[in-house]
């Protein structure tokens, strides 16, 4: 299917570096993976242009705009930019995935013109945390520190949200960032489905505190992730298909009834499995049923996450407390600390206590760096248990108004929120 990937991001995010690296990587594939980088025209001297830009005079730019030769046009900082209509239309007619280096100011215009059942339209937001952006801009030395802080604050406030946004956090190596961008452009990012306790519940708060403490102890970094139970194996597809699949799973779970888990008293550690470094081992009949329902719903969406001959017993549900490669002595100490933290509470994750899992999260988990994971959508599940209290979530207007184009049947039992960092 044809697709448009508008690419943007704040200064200091490394957008051009990753785009050029992704293009070089795609050129190694047959037909470049069906991806076309449409060069933008710009009123800038040739020696100041990247390989993704074509310099033109201001007169030529104005003439092209007057003659309707531009698919998209914008101005910024006394410079004029445009995406040639002929080049973009030719790429889409050939079923290509077109990459456009644009300003956020033209996103709505592009979506209104091109998004349809035959063409996916995304905004690839290449960014980084405020602290990393600030460090990079200060290193350039072009602006005083106070201006850099204001600039970064404005950029973070203006970050786009919505089902059409694919967030790439560029805080690792160039190779890692390139892999994420390449996966996004090919529609091959990895997505995971998480079940989580209600955000205002004791279970959620206690687990969050433990996760933050363990991140600080094991990695000297307080960045964590939401408490979650991974529902099934991850899957690879486009973001549009991932959102549709998540809604199908949410509908199946809501129709079946409430989902809960029980801590079986065992705190697991692993030096060989990165994803199970430190976990609470879980049980629960409804949790195993949810796993089967999710697999069946994903299979109906042509996303098979089961393995041939895999039995129900292969599912080992757990609450993740830490990810990474750690020495056994370190993990043993972490296990003792978790035991002490749990012992201080009479509710939350006591042995055999039923903990309701009220929300389903769709998370992009393509990177091994969990702080780069991105929450794409959250669905509040329906429940037949009146004692289970849900927090109230406002619908994501961008997703709801464009649901028909994404093929998402918004179930009456669920409310979706999109576009948050998975932290």
Image (cartoon, helix red, strand yellow):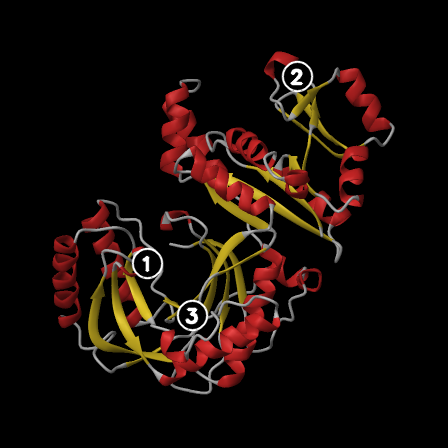
Across and down, in percent, residue 411 comes to 60, 75
Across and down, in percent, residue 401 comes to 67, 61
What's the CA distance linking mark 2 and mark 1? Answer: 48 Å
Total label count?
3
Query: Which numbered tag is attached to residue 44?
Result: 2
The crowding category of the residue bearing disc 3, from other C-alpha atoms within 10 Å (few below 14, some 14 to 19, many at least 20), is many
Across and down, in percent, residue 244 comes to 60, 65
Q: In this rendering, which labeled residue sits more in front, label 1 or label 3?
A: 1
Q: For mark 3, what is the residue? A: 231
**Quarter of the C terminus within the rendering:** bottom left
Across and down, in percent, residue 294 comes to 50, 74
Q: For mark 1, what is the residue? A: 275
In this view, the residue farthest toward the front is 309
What's the CA distance linking mark 2 and mark 3? Answer: 51 Å
Q: Nearer the viewer, residue 254 or 76?
A: 254
The first of marks 2 and 3 along the sequence is 2
């Amino acid at each position: 299917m044809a697709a448009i990937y508008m690419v943007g991001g704040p200064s200091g995010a490394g957008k051009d570096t990753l785009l050029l690296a992704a293009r070089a990587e795609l050129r190694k594939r047959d037909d470049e993976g069906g991806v076309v980088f449409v060069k933008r025209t710009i009123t800038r001297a040739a020696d100041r242009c990247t390989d993704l830009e074509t310099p033109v005079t201001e007169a030529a730019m104005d003439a092209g705009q007057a003659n309707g030769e531009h698919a998209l046009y914008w101005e910024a900082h006394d410079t004029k930019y445009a995406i040639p209509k002929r080049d973009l239309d030719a790429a889409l007619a050939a079923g290509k995935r077109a990459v456009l280096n644009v300003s956020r100011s033209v996103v709505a215009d592009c979506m209104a013109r091109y998004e349809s059942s035959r063409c996916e339209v995304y905004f690839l937001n290449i960014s980084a945390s405020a602290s990393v952006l600030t460090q990079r801009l200060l290193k350039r030395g072009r602006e005083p520190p106070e201006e850099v802080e204001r600039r970064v604050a404005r950029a973070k406030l203006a970050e786009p949200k919505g089902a059409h946004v694919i967030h790439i956090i560029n805080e690792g190596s160039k190779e890692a960032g390139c892999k994420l961008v390449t996966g996004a452009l090919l529609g091959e990012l990895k997505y995971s489905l998480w079940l989580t306790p209600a955000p205002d519940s004791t279970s959620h708060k206690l687990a969050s505190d433990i996760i933050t403490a363990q991140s600080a102890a094991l990695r000297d970094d307080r960045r964590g992730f939401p408490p979650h139970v991974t529902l099934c194996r991850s899957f690879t597809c486009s973001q549009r298909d991932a959102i549709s699949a998540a809604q199908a799973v949410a509908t199946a779970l809501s129709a079946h009834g409430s989902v809960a888990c029980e801590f079986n008293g065992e705190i697991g550690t692993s030096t060989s499995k990165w994803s199970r470094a430190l976990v609470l081992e879980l049980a629960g009949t409804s949790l195993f049923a949810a796993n089967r329902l999710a697999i069946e719903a994903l299979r109906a969406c042509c996303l098979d996450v089961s393995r041939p001959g895999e039995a129900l017993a292969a599912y080992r549900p757990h609450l993740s407390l830490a990810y990474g490669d750690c020495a056994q002595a370190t993990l043993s100490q972490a296990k003792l600390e978790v035991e002490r933290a749990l012992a201080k509470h009479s509710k939350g994750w006591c042995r055999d206590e039923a903990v309701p899992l009220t929300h389903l999260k769709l998370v992009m988990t393509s990177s091994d760096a969990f702080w780069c994971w991105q929450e794409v959508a959250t669905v509040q599940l329906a429940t037949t248990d009146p004692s289970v209290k849900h927090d109230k979530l406002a619908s994501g207007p961008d997703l709801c108004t464009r649901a028909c184009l994404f093929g998402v049947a918004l179930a009456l039992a669920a409310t979706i929120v999109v576009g948050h960092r998975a932290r």
